[in-house]
């Protein structure tokens, strides 16, 4: 409520429609917005917040069995014991480090290729732009499990045409060896997601006003100079967005190692954090698996949010 003093009476005068609830039209708009967002809020709480809360809750308990395990089991409060056990688990820590190293190399390479393809399609000299967009996007449209099976055939030295062609020129290569299997997984991820990220970056390029590019060309800035000094700085928010999505996606790495595990002996059941969590679940240790999933979620949040804040500060500093 806002009040003013009448110049004659010097008494507070209430303005119409400025009560505690606001004007009737404003209340109707607020009520409409709440009703419009309510279905999403209910689904988000039921499908996202509730499972997270339940996983956190379960991570604080453990199942105890008396005697030789033949008696009835009881669930008891375990505090932070599962978290301390997860942080001491060498297999789980190794999986975290392994995925971090894969993402540290694969994500910049993938986003660099996506940016390059987006710039090439956006250039004036590009022809058949829609065709190339469709071709680059097709790997993402292919289901991940099917793509992983396809790549497993291409990686198996006994039947792979790639390794056969290399052996014909004297190069012996096993993509499923202990040393090269992270590179093979990174290649699969890059092949699948480059086109998706390219479309996001290309959409940001299309949103750049044509006047800016024309003004830069009039000043003698064209070709790669135009891309480096004008286009790339303006699509920086899209690059940050794709990087955050890629960090989150890499932390959830599961399908590719799980499929390759059938043909590669170097990939164990705890190769990635998700596989390690599934391994604990297969042993009926659900509470420990919940603790591992919470640790993974926290680390993913720290990495993605930390990267986002770092880029924001760097952008403000520049």
Image (cartoon, rainbow, N blue to C red):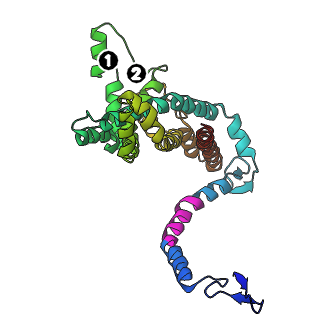
For label 1, the residue is: 163
**Residue ID at (69%, 88%):** 14
**Where does the image place residue 20, in percent across and percent down from the top left?**
67, 83
Helix, strand or loop at disc 2? Answer: loop
Q: Is residue 43 magenta?
A: yes
Viewer-proximal residue among 168 and 60: 168
From where the camera sits, is residue 113 visible? no
Q: Of callouts 2 and 1, which one flags the residue occurring earlier in the amino acid sequence?
A: 1
**Residue ID at (66%, 54%):** 56
Q: Residues within 10 Å of mark 2 (few under 14, many from 20)?
A: many
Helix, strand or loop at disc 1? Answer: helix
From where the camera sits, is residue 20 visible? yes
Viewer-proximal residue among 279 and 173: 173
The N terminus, quarter of image? bottom right
**Residue ID at (52%, 72%):** 38
**Residue ID at (35%, 45%):** 210
Residues tagged 2 and 1 counted as in contact (Cβ below 8 A): yes
Total numbered labels: 2
**Where does the image place residue 189, in percent across and percent down from the top left?**
42, 34
For label 2, the residue is: 175
The C terminus, quarter of image? top right
Is 126 on the left-hand or right-hand side of 35?
A: left
**Where does the image place residue 128, in percent across and percent down from the top left?**
21, 38
């Amino acid at each position: 409520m806002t009040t003013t003093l009448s110049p004659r009476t010097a008494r507070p005068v209430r303005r119409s429609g400025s009560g505690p609830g606001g004007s009737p039209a404003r209340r109707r708009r607020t009520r409409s917005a709440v009703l419009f967002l309510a279905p999403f809020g209910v689904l988000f709480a039921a499908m996202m917040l509730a499972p997270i809360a339940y996983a956190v809750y379960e991570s604080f308990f453990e199942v105890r069995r008396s005697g030789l395990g033949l008696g009835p089991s009881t669930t008891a409060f375990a505090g932070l014991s599962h978290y301390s056990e997860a942080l001491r688990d060498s297999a789980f820590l190794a999986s975290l480090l392994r995925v971090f190293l894969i993402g540290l190399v694969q994500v910049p390479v993938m986003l660099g290729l996506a940016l390059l393809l987006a710039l090439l399609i956006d250039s004036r000299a590009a022809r058949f732009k829609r065709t190339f967009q469709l071709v680059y996007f097709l790997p993402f449209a292919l289901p991940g499990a099917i793509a992983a099976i396809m790549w497993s055939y291409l990686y198996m030295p006994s039947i792979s045409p790639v390794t056969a062609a290399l052996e014909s020129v004297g190069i012996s290569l096993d993509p499923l060896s202990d040393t090269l299997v992270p590179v093979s997984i990174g290649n699969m991820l890059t092949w699948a997601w480059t086109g998706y990220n390219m479309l996001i970056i290309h959409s940001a390029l299309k949103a750049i006003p044509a006047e800016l590019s024309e003004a830069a060309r009039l000043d003698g800035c064209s070709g790669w100079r135009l891309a480096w000094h004008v286009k790339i700085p303006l699509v920086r928010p899209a690059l940050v967005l794709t990087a955050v999505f890629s960090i989150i996606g890499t932390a959830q790495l599961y399908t590719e190692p799980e499929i390759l595990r059938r043909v590669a002996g170097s990939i164990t059941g705890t190769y990635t954090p998700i596989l390690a969590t599934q391994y604990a679940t297969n042993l009926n240790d659900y509470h420990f698996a919940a603790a591992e999933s919470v640790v993974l979620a926290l680390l993913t949040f720290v990495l993605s949010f930390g990267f986002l804040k770092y880029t924001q500060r760097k952008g403000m500093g520049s």
